[in-house]
Image (cartoon, rainbow, N blue to C red):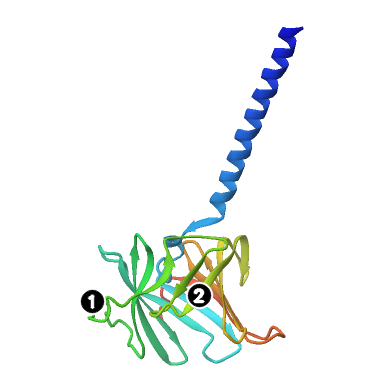
Amino acid sequence: MKNNALKRILASILFAAVLFAGFRSAVTAEEATESVDTSNYAPGLFYSYYDHIGVGMEFAPFTLTLDYEPDEDGIYQVSRANAGNTVSYVYQLTEDGVIELAYYPNSYEGEDFRYHEDSLDEQVATFFPAELAVGDTFTRGYRDELEFTVTDILAEHEVEGETYHDVLVIESVMPEGEVQRYYYAPEIGEIASEYIFDDEGNAITTALSEYGEVPVE
């Protein structure tokens, strides 16, 4: 009788240990899907050309081009063009995340600003910290003036008929209650945005419609 009782106790302990180990594994797997390496979501890095349609104002549509790929220090440049204006941005991939070194309004296609004195000074802005999880907050801007929160990491999200996976969603609520929301897909970058400016849900929106090589005119 004592042997049978001991066997039952040992079996119970073994079952509990296996169950606990399985629970720990499940939690670890779940946690892994709730955080991302933001270098996989860097802006304008993975293709030469991105075309975004826009609704709500004339400046909403834009194209993004990769002017210069990352150098040995991870510095690269993209240009955003809309409504006859082009702004060039210089970014750097670092251990601390993706940072914006400088931006240049009214620039021209092909101008190289990577080693301009403004790109090499100490004034930088965070674009993404190195890793983000749901619920994390971070600031953007050269004065850290904009606070964003990671509201979701979507397993699937459809934009203009294409389904993207592991989509990072960040959101900023403005002082007057306006909401700015961005969607980023891995190895693509920004795929959509929403600027909701009233309680009725009226918004300015953008959506990635095409990406790949620069179109030949």
Disc 1 secondary structure class: loop
Point out residue 36 in the picture as x, y percentages from the top left corner: 49, 57
Q: Nearer the viewer, residue 183 or 45?
A: 183
Mark 1 crowdedness (10 Å alpha carbons): few <14, some 14-19, many ≥20: few
**Res 174 seen here:** yes
Tell me residue 215's x, y (percent). Answer: 43, 77
In three-dimensional space, the C-alpha distance between marks 1 and 2, rounded to whole angstroms, equals: 28 Å
User: Mark number for residue 133?
Assistant: none
Circle number at residue 147:
2
Q: Is residue 86 left or right of residue 25?
A: left
Q: Which residue is mark 1?
A: 115
Quadrant of the image containing the C terminus? bottom left
Of the numbered discs 1 and 2, the one sitting upstream in the chain is 1
Q: In the orientation shown, which residue stands out farthest toward the right?
A: 1
Q: Measuring 53% from the left and 63% from the top, which residue is drawn there? A: 136
Query: At numbered mark 2, what does the secondary structure look like: helix, strand or loop?
Result: strand
User: Which residue is rendered at x = 49% and y = 83% of the image?
Assistant: 62
Residue 102: image location, x then y, percent:
33, 79
Note whether 31 is above or below 124 in the view shown: above
Tell whether 67 sits left or right of 210. left
Amino acid type, callout 1: Tyr
Front residue of this view, candidates 210 and 66? 66
